[in-house]
Amino acid sequence: MSDQFTDVPGDVPPAFQVVDARVAYDGVPVLDGVDLTIPTGQTVAVLGPNGSGKSTLMRAMLGVAPLTSGEIRVHGAPLRRFRSWHRIGYVPQRLTAGGAVPATVREIVASGRVAARRRLSLPTRADRAAVDEALETVGLADRARHSVRELSGGQQQRVLIARALAGRPDTFVMDEPMAGVDAENQRALAHTIARLRERGSTVLLVLHELGPLEDVIERSVVLDAGHVVHDGAAPEPTGECARPGHEHQHPHPDPNAPDSADTTTAAEMIRLEVPGRD
Amino acid sequence: MTELLNYEFMRRALIAAVLVGLVTPVIGTYLVQRRLALLGDGIGHVALTGVALGLLTSTSPVLTAAVVATLGAVLIELVRVRTRTSGDVALALLFYGGIAGGVLLIGLTPGASNATLVSYLFGSVSTVEEADLWVVGVLAAGVAAVVAVFGRELFVLCQDEEVARAHGLPVRFLSVLLAVTAALTVVIAMRVVGVLMVSALMIVPVAAAQQLTRSFRVTMLLAVLIGLLSSVGGLTTSFYADLSPGATIVVLALAVFCVAVAVGGLLRRASAGRSPAAPVTGVAGTMPQTDRGRVTP
């Protein structure tokens, strides 16, 4: 599996190239020199405890959070000069999909076409087809005319994913798409992401735990305190968490993985403690 | 009802009321969606300084108010972006500065009295002149054009600023555009309901409409309808009952809001009876923004 991400075809630039990225809020470093290359077509999970900087890394990679120093390239272009925004589908970390004014599921999803549509134009057949397809993919076609407020948290999360799909991007950045989502909706989301992977899309996910996505993820990057502490195969549950019947998977670096970060040895294995509501 | 139209000043007042009823709820819908419902109020306070400058320098108060309100809107937007935590305090300073500056300058103006001040604070639609009508008409057309051209981008911006940025939209430009458009709307509405109640016409029709709707577009259309009904209905009522037009318009809009809340409640209860919402069971996810975790060797 590790071959897959060292072997980049010469012509296609990586989807994301992060070089020594640093971000600080009010002088407090959140990202402290992160290097990361995501080749196109890869499905990557970014894991780490709360406050490790994983959301900030995603936001920095899209120019939402400004870098203090370092460089980020998106599909070969420096972020500042990147113009192919229609290639990017962003799913932000949100508990609800709505603003303060009611909006239907279809209105929210159709707004994902904003980068693809021309000004002062009515929606074309292609626009409508893309929105229909996005709604179908997340299984919300029958809810299109409902107000997003009427939906459960998990369904609202699917609306946000459908909005990203509607722009027909080939590169997805999803920040905690599983947060606050019930088990059934988590499986539905995992299915959607598996389909994106089959299509050859690049999918970058911030996750709290692998959960039902375990089989879809090709590569896991673990952040702690603004540093990359593991980059390689999805870490296997070890120790306590490996015993049968253990219910949640926290990211534990696999001591046997050849490309675990060099700071990690079997002796001083990193144990992630993720407090919270799980 | 038609005797109303026999008076020249009422014809002008009605035209102003129609323009205000049409335009203010449109911008109000975006402001409510962006959770900036009080922005119009703040700009209204700043606009008073503009009015006073116009009176002091004997230029059209509507024009000077438009200029000062626009500058104020840009300033408010900059303050909002720059100061993440103390933004509301900075805004408050600007609001009180605007109203104090206005009262001070009007006091310095020879010939201006408390009556002049009150007419701008609470509106004086019956004193609208033809020149005012032209300014209001052009501003209303400008606001409509902005929404026609940038409506889609503004929807994304007001829905989720971060997503707008990740779409590559010019977030800063759009934010300033919305604030400036709101400022022009405030100036349009100022002559009818006065700077202290200007925000009511932007917000109350939207608040009423969203009790009854599911979609953004329908909310906006219904808000415009409620805005028109309130402004024209309020003006007519005030003419016959000899009431303050601005206050009557706002009270009428609030009455519509109360009715909408009651009707909306009944509608929701009825639809809940038909299809009970599926209970959320088996929450197995983790929540963001929980305690900070740690990594221990």
Image (tube, coloured by chain):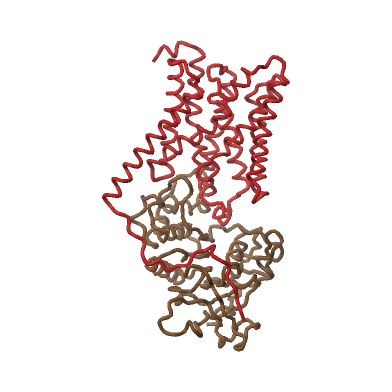
Say which residue appears at 69% left-offset and 14% top-offset. B111
Judging depth in this view, the residue of B114 and A190 nearest the camera is: B114
Say which residue appears at 44% left-offset and 35% top-offset. B223
Q: Residue B259 at what x, y percent from top left? A: 37, 34
Total labels drawn: 0
Drawn colour of chain B?
red
Q: Residue B279 at what x, y percent from top left? A: 34, 60
Q: Is residue B109 left or right of residue A14?
A: right
Is residue A202 something one can see in this rendering? no
Quadrant in the picture for residue B57:
top right
Q: Residue A111 at what x, y percent from top left? A: 47, 51
Say which residue appears at 57% left-offset and 72% top-offset. A48
Q: Is residue A193 above or below residue B276?
A: below
Q: Residue A52 at what x, y percent from top left? A: 61, 69
Is residue A80 something one can see in this rendering? yes
Quadrant in the picture for residue B52:
top right
Judging depth in this view, the residue of A278 and A166 nearest the camera is: A278
Q: Is residue A150 above or below residue A35?
A: above
Judging depth in this view, the residue of A250 and A90 nearest the camera is: A250
Judging depth in this view, the residue of B292 and A256 nearest the camera is: B292
User: Which chain is tinted brown?
Assistant: A
Residue placed farthest to the left in the image? B274
